[in-house]
Image (cartoon, rainbow, N blue to C red):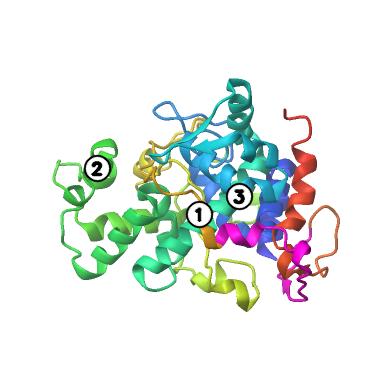
Amino acid sequence: MAVDRVANGLAPQISGAIRQAAQSTGISFQYLLTTAQIESNLNPSAQASTSSAQGLYQFIDQTWLGTVKQGGAAFGMGQYADAISQTADGQYQVADPAMRSAIMKLRTDPAASAMMAGVLARNNAEQLSATIGRAPTEGELYTAHFLGPDGAGRLINAATGNPNANAATMFPAAAAANRPIFYHRDGSAKSVADVYDRLTGKFDTARVAVMRPPGDIPNVTNVTSTPATTTAAPISFANLYAPVPSTLRSLSSPVPDTAGVTQALASADNRPPPQTTRPMFQDMFSDPTRGAVARTVASLWTDQSATGQTASSSVAPVATNGQSAEQPVRTLELFTDGAANVRGMFTGRG
């Protein structure tokens, strides 16, 4: 299987963290791997120089706090989730400086970062599909990293309804911070269709690159986003996630708040980017007044055992930690199974 070959070519810690997150959240391993490649070059310690983005998935401060607050308890991060509060204007904060430092440091832990990336991915996809009226492709879903789910929805709809519209006018703040994405080299503004093609196309290219056999995949210490010679066809939204019981399918899914695609996408334009372990993205644009995880998604992570609910449906099996790939995961344990495993990863984190 291609995914297994790719996983074997990565550092065990990175591969294991992403695989566990994929199994626990229902987001595909391929999607989470591609996102980590674009966001941080598969470097768990990556730190943006122009924003608060940090870690394997380049979470900015507010999105990380919001995601941990609303989804962390299901994955053994309850003490951190409880320490986070939300102000009247929607900002997330932690009263204790030491606790805040510990929470933010978790972004550099591959297991914590990958798990929260999967959680945020489900949320973004849910919002995006509601906005565009259909299931987004992986490339479209990734635009939510760049513009947030609301902005991504506007871009996708405009690309269909008004493709020649000025993208910089539609997204002035994003354009000001990411000129290579919104402007041509001669300084003229790109159209909505141009920006849409750029963002989705570069994700598809990165996906093809990271899914090469391990012999062709650079070690985690020197991975680069080398453009592929062929363009992958858009992935169906139905294939983005591991099969989930019908009772959960209507709740959709989204992507990690990773900072922005900016510099990486720009430098990947018809030439390999320079090898570097530094993150290649600008800060993301998101609405701080909304929760990081939709309530309908968060409700899936509550412990149903108290109500005596059970389920026999299974999620697509994934072999992790030596367990058989044939072992099913019960519907209502989609997230609680992950919590048991992840809790051990965070022991002693303070």
Q: On the picture, is 204 further left or further right than 105?
A: left
Disc 3 residue crowd, few under 14, some 14–19, many 20+, Cα 10 Å: many
Q: On the picture, is 283 further left or further right than 184?
A: right
The answer to whether residue 293 is above or below residue 285 is below
Magenta range: 297-319
Name the residue tied to disc 1.
255
Name of the residue lying farthest toward the bottom: 246
- The residue that appears at 35% across and 56% down in the rendered structure is 150
Q: Please provide percent x and percent y for residue 337.
A: 77, 57
SS of the residue under disc 2:
helix
Q: Nearer the viewer, mark 3 or mark 2?
A: 3
Report the number of discs. Answer: 3
Residue nearest the observer in this picture, 193 or 99:
99
Disc 1 residue crowd, few under 14, some 14–19, many 20+, Cα 10 Å: many
Name the residue tied to disc 3.
71
**Label 3 sits on what residue type?**
Gly
Name the residue tied to disc 2.
175
- The residue that appears at 80% across and 41% down in the rendered structure is 344
**Label 2 sits on what residue type?**
Ala
Q: Please provide percent x and percent y for residue 334.
A: 70, 63
The answer to whether residue 341 is above or below residue 319 is above
Sooner in the amino-acid sequence: mark 3 or mark 1: 3
Q: Nearer the viewer, mark 1 or mark 2?
A: 1
**Magenta span contains residue 202:** no
SS of the residue under disc 1:
loop
- Rounded to the nearest angstrom, the CA distance separating label 3 from label 2 is 31 Å
Q: Please provide percent x and percent y for residue 241.
A: 59, 66
Q: Are the residues at dot 1 and dot 2 in contact (C-beta closer than 8 Å)?
A: no
**Label 1 sits on what residue type?**
Val
